[in-house]
Image: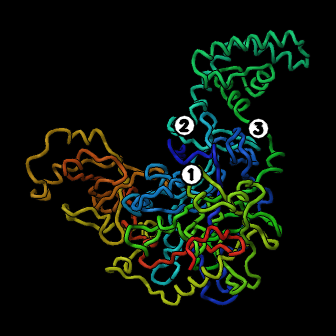
Amino acid sequence: MKRVLPAVLVWCFLSSPFISTEVSAADEQCQGGSDGESCQSENKSDSVMEENTCTLYMAPSSIPGAGFGIFTAKTLEKDSIFIMNDGPNIAIPDPFEIPSPHLDLFGTVWWGENMGMVDQMRFEGRNVVDYQIGFGALPNFHPYLYNLYFDQPEIPYDDTILDRTLDPGAGASTYYAGKNFGVTRSVEAGDELFLNYGEGFLDSKPSFSYVPRQRDYEMAGNILAKFEELLVEVKALEENNKSLSSKVKGEIEARLTDIQNVASVFSERFHSILPKTYPELVRVMSGANSFDSVDLSDAVAKELSLDRRGLDWLKKNGLCLDNIIPGRSQIKQAGNGAFAQRSISNGETVVPVPLLHITNRDVLRMYEGAPDTKQLLLNYCFGHSESSLLLCPMTNAILVNHCSHRKKECGKEGPNAEYRWSTEWDSTTSEWINKSLKDLAEARDGRVVSLDIVATRDIKAGEEIFMDYGTTWEKAWDDYLSTWKAPVRDGVFEEHKSVKLLNEQEEPLELNPDLRSYSPMEEGGVFTGCWYWQDDEQDADYDGEEEDFDWMDLDDEEILSLYSRDGEHFRIHHYSDFGWFWPCSVVAKDDDSGSTYTVRIFQSKSHPQTAWSEQDAPRFLTNFPRSSIRFFTSLYKSDQHLPDAFRHHIEFRDDIFPEQWKNRRV
């Protein structure tokens, strides 16, 4: 099921766009040998089909003054998916436990629980946000030409990547895959791709009050359609290559002025997007498939609101975003890694890395007074041990794992890439690396610095990309390995089962016949969730006065008689459906085959409170489809919550880290 992007999504790429690259600090040493050869995974170079031509670019936006945007280098057909798993997502549970203005920038890349978040991630904490990279964060917004939608991948969460009882790397990297993205309309090669942030985003920003809305473009198409006779006349003249006298052009522009005068009555935004000159009218007319209002609205949006420059310009001025794709790293403890989708020459940019800055890293502590509980995001950010600053990437460069020439964990040749300050495409970096931390702390409008990951030797298609995280990171990992023990916390982490494997099984479900049990979400390491939504018809039963008895005092037969409803219609239709799994307990099997069950639904933390929950009444459903029941890891029980999971930033090299940013010298 295709998903149009959420109404309010991420901070607009319009005024200060950024792309970034996250590099997983969770990447670990191979335990099998010093040269890394024994750690070769299934993802060898011959398993990657080489795509010689870059298909996705970052380049100056076609929206004037909007910074950078994301472009396609190939024509995309309507409703087609063009990228699978655009890069890992990172769960950030309870991000507001330690309020701080230092996280203001991250409103640009966080999706909330009801904005495209997979269900397992919603159960990472009481409140959760989804740190996005790639197409979840980078594209600009156009109120009329937005063209992106997303689907969840077939396996959005894979907790079999590492085993917490065997692998020190468990909990040090994200298990969440990126989303699949497609287009809602046909997009020509060379054109920009746009998210739908929702016009509420524009309405909330006084500085965007001038930006035309969808209704303005629709009105422009409607009013131009009323001048069809004029458009037909102009088209005929243009097609016959008849040059118009200045007098005739003046007469046509006078008629355009009449249109402008009519438009000015409605709104300045509407008035601003209508053609004002003869050349602008020709552009609209040439861009329209017909002279009906819809085609004319499209033409006005494309020809008058954008600076469309074509594929040749894009290839010359853009930065390739799809040089790398995800795959299982050859270094086992690293989880996933970055693999070259095509050959990359020595000195060529592997991926650009726009960065978001946090000038006080303490805000990535999970909880006040608990300095050792740090967000997983820390592992993906660049920092320096003598500074409070963190710089967090936003592209799939987060996939690039650690390898050094000192240990050659990735093989005899060592790493094949390195990071550098970006001083070419990002003209602001040179300026900002000479400013103070105070200056950075006061910069709240978006990206101020960027890196590039650059090939240090020729890289073949299918080869994994590695760079050096630094000696400080390497020592921290070695120290962690020397003391690591399998986790035990009241037996919960020790007994954890993989929800991916549980969901792949087709065996009958284990029953909990206790009708009075509490929500399973916090008991044990795994719980069941049921595909459910608020049913107005069924909830109408609870619109009256509250009952004057305690339902728990009733016997089981009475409880089911009073509080059960038919649940046959709560069916999930597609593997990518998400967002509507509510905690539930499986009470009884309704048929011998185990295809339907009686379940008890518990109030979801991510949805409005139901009438039955408000009255402290239970909700039981009979005939509930087995296919609509899945397993989830309980609150705070996934690997990223392991009490001693590895946490460390990627260490900046001293030779490029500004001295004035070192505010925590030892």
Q: Measure the alpha-carbon separation of dots 1 and 2.
A: 18 Å
**Mark 2, mark 3: which one is toward the viewer?**
2
Question: Callout 1: few (<14), some (14-19), or many (20+) C-alpha neighbours within 10 Å?
Answer: some
Element assignment for label 2: helix
Task: Using the image, determine if residue 404 lies above or below residue 313.
Answer: below
Question: Which mark is on residue 367?
Answer: none
Camera-side residue: 207 or 249?
A: 207
Residue 572 in the image, given as x and y percentages of width and height: 42, 51
| Mark 2: amino acid | Leu
The residue under the point 62% across, 64% down is 22
Task: Using the image, determine if residue 259 lies above or below residue 666.
Answer: above
The residue under the point 73% across, 26% down is 288
Camera-side residue: 533 or 274?
A: 274
**Mark 1, mark 2: which one is toward the viewer?**
1
Residue 530 in the image, given as x and y percentages of width and height: 35, 56
**Number of numbered discs present?**
3
Q: Measure the alpha-carbon separation of dots 3 and 1.
A: 30 Å
Residue 265 in the image, given as x and y percentages of width and height: 58, 15
The mark that comes first in sequence, 1 or 2, is: 2
Residue 519: image quadrant is: bottom left
Element assignment for label 1: loop
Question: Which mark is on residue 308?
Answer: 3
Task: Using the image, determine if residue 301 lies above or below residue 431.
Answer: above
The residue under the point 24% across, 53% down is 620
Can residue 640 be seen from the camera position used here? Answer: yes
Pointers 3 and 1 in contact (C-beta within 8 Å): no
Question: Horizontal placement of 129 versus 220: left or right?
Answer: left
Determine which residue is flagged by label 2.
Answer: 202
Residue 331: image quadrant is: bottom right
The mark that comes first in sequence, 3 or 1, is: 3
**Mark 3, mark 1: which one is toward the viewer?**
1
Determine which residue is flagged by label 1.
Answer: 444
